Amino acid sequence: MNLSMSSKLIVCGVCEYRNINKPSVVWCSECDEGLCKECQEHHAASKVSRDHSCVQISEYQKLPANILEITHNCPKHNEKYQIFCKKHDSPCCRRCVVESHDQCGGLNAIDDVIQNVKSSNAFLEIEQMLVEVSENLQRIRKGRQDNIQSLKENKTKIELEIKETRILINDHLDKLQESLLKELYAAEEKENKKISCLISSIQEKEMEITEYLTNFDKIKQHASDLQTFVAMKHIQQDVSKNEQFIESMLKEDKTNNVTLSFKKEKVFENLPTTLIKMGPIIVDTMSSDITLTRRKNKQAQIMLPSTHVPTIDDIKLTLKQTVNTMGAYITDCSLLPDGRMIFSGYESNKIYVIKTDGSLDFTLQTGSCTSHMHFKEDIQKLVVTSGIEKSITIIDMKNRKTEKLIQCGSSVYGIAYNNGQLFYNGYDSGLCVVSLDNDSVTQLENVKLRSNSSIAIWSDQLYYLNIDDSVVCCDLQGKLKWKSELASFLRSAQGIAVDNHGRVYISGFYSHNVVVISPDGHKHRVLLLKKDGIKNPQSLFFDRTNNKLLISNQTNEAFLYDVSNK
């Protein structure tokens, strides 16, 4: 409550007018002033004011400050409110009606509008609604508090399961190690026996040859020629046997060195890279068992303000700028927060950044055929897809350098971001999701999408274009919400965007038009045609902050529109 209001409540208004300072004891809302005890008596006796309702000043001061600031007089003209304008949903004084509401229909005497308002069904309905909302909030808060407790219990349980899993893995690895060591010891023992047996045979042959050499010297010195000749024959035969023994060892590979080695199974070779973690922590949601109180809506008996929700029929486009896109085969377009425009050149492998006056600011070389883009304003990163290279490139727009490259294993076209995930058009691979935590790719929906087509996310809904020119709306888990067939008025749908009211804008490449679909997918309206310069429109982008629609033809031109509601 401001100082002037406090003063009005404390001092008797009638006495203050007479330059007498006396405290007020009651408040008359119709007179909009406080009254002392004596003035209250005159007030109650006067014919003009005897029907006025007064309350004790101490009770009146308990009202909220924003209620106390509501007066019975017009702040502009300082005259008492007499009329209520239904069109503008506001009370008016006599001069307000003359100056601003003389053309308005539905002017009613304000006394008629507010008569018996505190006992009206509408007042009671609002009071009951407040009670209902309060009870529902308490139920939801308790449900969320219970959920926190259950999450703590889940965490404790999973911690135990992880430790048990680790023990199982350790036990299994211990058994594998024990079995492998037994196999190793057995192999070594077997080969040792073979080699030891061969060594014994060799040693026997060595002894025979050594003995022959010893005898050979003696024969040379003391034996007769006949004895020498006969002995030579015997020795020659024994030497030949030993040579045959050596040749047999060589032939049978008995002299080859035996080695022991260990070859890991393929599953263990890839284990460091494939076994990233024991298993995923799954965050799942299920329907709450909270039962909320929902009362049947009743028609209020007093006039309450209503908010008009814009429809596709309310859309008004105003062309603000025609832009030279600098290159052929533009596959996507976007608007930066500062108003600059960006276009992806598929054949030139470049991103063109255009100033607000239409001149070229700079280009980015992506190194591959650029398909689609998404700008993350919070971190100043540009996400660029390449259908041919099957990859996603993340570019730091501050230093204009590539920060990261993600290989997706499938074609990548239209892309959108939500909560740490990149959703993209994977063409034959369907609708896919990349987690930016670990670059893992999962398939959200197994459908065949049109190549070079965009996707869009608005609120908790995902929009994409099928190859049969139908538009699909689903939740972020892939559950279908609605599907709209467009083939009768749209051919080769490519670009898709959603405005702040859930209205879906789509460009038809071969039908040379731009169409808007109602938020429920039931109605459509053609916004632009070939006569408006729309020729092979490849992409479009809706700036929800500034209500601007950027549409790019495949070659030469793009058009920037202001979007308003009629």
Image (cartoon, rainbow, N blue to C red):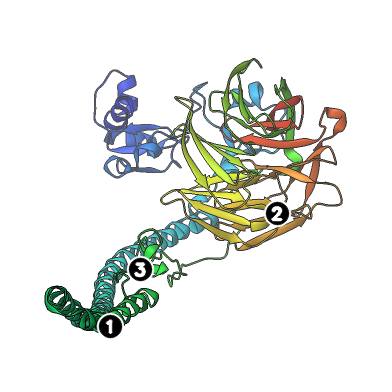
Q: Position of residue 436 (x, y in %)?
A: 45, 48
Q: Is residue 110 above or below residue 458?
A: above
User: What amino acid type is highlighted by mark number 1?
Assistant: Asp
Q: Which mark is residue 449?
A: 2
User: Mark 1 vs mark 3: which is more N-terminal?
Assistant: 1
Q: Is residue 140 above or below residue 398?
A: below
User: What amino acid type is highlighted by mark number 2?
Assistant: Leu
Disc 2 element: loop
Q: Mark 1 or mark 3: which is in front?
A: 1
Q: Is residue 312 or residue 53 the one in the foreground?
A: 312
Q: Is residue 429 or residue 508 the one in the foreground?
A: 429
Q: Position of residue 519 (x, y in %)?
A: 68, 50
* Residue named by callout 1: 238
Q: Which mark is residue 263?
A: 3
Q: Position of residue 353 (x, y in %)?
A: 60, 23
Q: Is residue 284 above or below residue 557?
A: below
Q: Residue at x 74, y 37 (%)?
A: 538
**Label 3: how many residues lie within 10 Å, few (<14), some (14-19) or many (20+)?**
few
Q: Residue at x 83, y 46 (%)?
A: 491
Q: Quadrant of the N terminus?
A: top left
Q: Is residue 189 visible?
A: no
Q: Residue at x 51, y 66 (%)?
A: 294
Left or right relative to 12: residue 420: right
User: What amino acid type is highlighted by mark number 3?
Assistant: Lys
Q: Quadrant of the C terminus?
A: top right
Disc 3 element: loop
Q: Is residue 538 visible?
A: yes
User: Mark 3 vs mark 2: which is more N-terminal?
Assistant: 3
Real-space Cα separation, disc 3 to disc 2, in angstroms: 45 Å
Q: Is residue 473 or residue 194 the one in the foreground?
A: 194
